[in-house]
Image: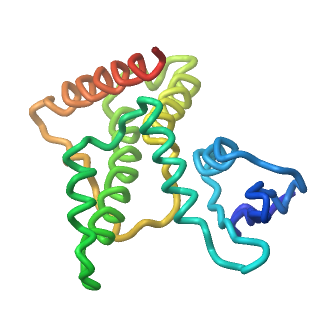
Amino acid sequence: MAETDKPLLIKRYASRRLYNTETSDYVTLEDIAGFIRAGREVQIVDLKSGDDLTRQYLLQIIAEHESRGDNVLPTNVLTDLVRSYTGQVGSVVPQFLAASFEMLRDGQSKMMENMEKMNPMSTMPGYEAMKAQQEMFLKAMTGGMSGSWGAPGSATPEPSDSGDDLNDIKRELAELQAKLARMGK
C-alpha cells in the first residue's frame, strides 16, 4: 500500500513519457489529473536533469481541460492572471489564490455540516448514503481540490435566524446541478 501523505513521484523520460514510480507503469496527463482529483499530491521530475516539472504539467492539464470546453476560469480571471505576471517579486496573487481555494474547500465542508444540522431528513433511513453522494458531487464540481493552499477561511456565511440559509443552499445546489448538466453534454 502506497504512502499517500508523500507526493506520488512521476518521472518524465527523454521520450516525454511519464512513469509512475509506485505502480511501475506509464501514465497519461489524464491519469495524473485523476490522482489529483482523488486527493493525491504529485511531483513530476525530469529523469535526466532532476528538474521539477510539476507546475508545467499542472498548467498543461488545466489548459487541456479549458480547451475541451471545461471552462472553469472565466476570461476576465485569465486576463487578470496574465496581468499579474508583471515581474514583481512581491505579488499577492499566489497568496490570494491559495486563500481563495482554501475558503472554497472550507465553505464546501461547512455547507455539508449546515445541511445536516438544518435538514429534518437527517433522521430518515438512507440519509447517510445521500449525504455521501452529495459530497462526491461537490468534490467532482470543484475538481477534487485538496491539500494545504493557505490561510483557512470560510466562504459560507454563518447561519442566521431568518431561514434564508436553506434557500441559499438550495439555490447553490441548483446552480451546481445546472453546471454539472452542462459538463455532461
Front residue of this view, candidates 4 and 88 = 88
Front residue of this view, candidates 51 and 34 = 51
Question: Where residue 129 appears, x then y in whole percent?
Answer: 58, 24
Asked which quadrant contains residue 93, the reply is: bottom left
Please say if 68 is above or below 56.
Answer: above
Please say if 154 is above or below 159.
Answer: below
What is the tally of numbered marks visible in this picture? 0
Residue at x-position 28% and y-position 24%: 175
Q: Horizontal placement of 40 versus 172: left or right?
A: right
Question: Where residue 47 appears, x then y in whole percent?
Answer: 78, 72
Q: Horizontal placement of 150 versus 32: left or right?
A: left
Question: Quadrant where the N terminus lies?
Answer: bottom right
Front residue of this view, candidates 2 and 30 = 30
Q: Horizontal placement of 181 versus 9: left or right?
A: left
Please say if 145 is above or below 143.
Answer: below
Residue at x-position 14% and y-position 30%: 164
Q: Horizontal placement of 42 versus 177: left or right?
A: right
Residue at x-position 15% and y-position 29%: 163
The color scheme shown is rainbow
Asked which quadrant contains residue 177, the reply is: top left
